Image (tube, grey):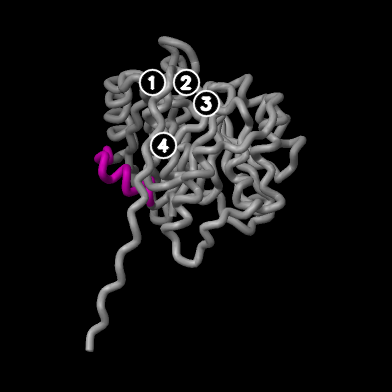
Amino acid sequence: MSSSPKPSAPVINFPNSPIPKNPLGEGRYIKTAAALIIGDEILNGNILDRNSNYFARFCFENGIELQGIEVIADDELKILEASRRMVQKYDFVITSGGIGPSHDDITYPSLAKSFGQELKYHDETLRRMEEASRHRTGISQQLTAAGKRMALFPEAGEVLFVASDTWVPVVRLEGKLCIFPGIPSLFQKLLDNLKPFLPLPADDERPFRLQVFTPLSESSIAPFLTDLQKRVKPENIRIGSYPLSQPGAHVALTGSDRERVKELGLEVEKELQGRLLSAEETELMIKDKRQ
């Protein structure tokens, strides 16, 4: 006798926030960025930080120059110092971690203090949190005091609901600093969905990367690449080389002038007995490095 199928849980479908005005001002766009990764568990090796790598790729693909990544402890003074310094220096800053219900989740109160704000419960976040809890088996519909802490935000922060299938928002302070959870799957979802809310560079302002495979060893190609980097440095083109587990190396050329980078790629291909990699091969190579 077959059992009847279990009814599927209702699908969460919250409305997203409207797109606000450019927080940097009309006509300006994000040029530089930094990441502040918060958590004792990252520093003691208990958890592997995947979010900074994902953010680095996000920045490159969207034409933003990521200029710094810092990992700090769950310490109020460290959060205050780093967040203030980064907001003064960069156009786009993210924090990752420390916004859960636990005693050591101090990111929201620390950032509120950093920018002279009080903490205030956000009613719409509480409502969405309670609604989402009804869709999860084994979860009480009555929110606990600890759970409600996850909706206790700096009062002047922009609360951006960017993904319809989660109650978790991105809170933005000073028009620059965006606060993210540390869970990689949720971090990635919110970051990807934040794109329409960011003043990103136009396509023609974004860097272009080209990869060349060479069967030669990294030490043998070093003199040529050293000379090449000196030659193209005034053109703001960067040259990098990465050894492989098998004989050979990958050479990466990155710059804003697509045609010039392609021209140099042909030169590297010829001089190093190499082969230009297709976009698909480059993407597979990047994925392999991330694993």
Q: Which residue is mark 1?
A: 201
Q: Which residue is mark 3?
A: 92
Q: Specify the farthest residue to the front.
A: 142
Q: Report the mark closest to the observer, 3 or 2.
A: 3
Pointers 3 and 1 in contact (CB under 8 A)? Answer: no
Image spot of residue 122 (x, y percent)? 56, 36
Nearer the N terminus, badge 4 or badge 2? 2
Q: Specify the farthest residue to the bottom.
A: 1
Q: CA distance from mark 4 to mark 3?
A: 17 Å
Q: Which residue is drawn at the image coordinates 45% and 52% (left, top)?
A: 132
Mark number displayed over residue 178: none
Q: CA distance from mark 3 to mark 2?
A: 8 Å
Nearer the N terminus, badge 3 or badge 2? 2
Mark 1: give few (<14), some (14-19) or many (20+) Cα within 10 Å.
some
Give amino acid for label 4: Val
Pointers 4 and 3 in contact (CB under 8 A)? Answer: no
Mark number displayed over residue 162: 4
Image spot of residue 144 (x, y percent)? 62, 54
Q: Report the mark closest to the observer, 4 or 3.
A: 4
Q: Quadrant of the C terminus?
A: bottom left
Secondary structure beneath label 3? strand
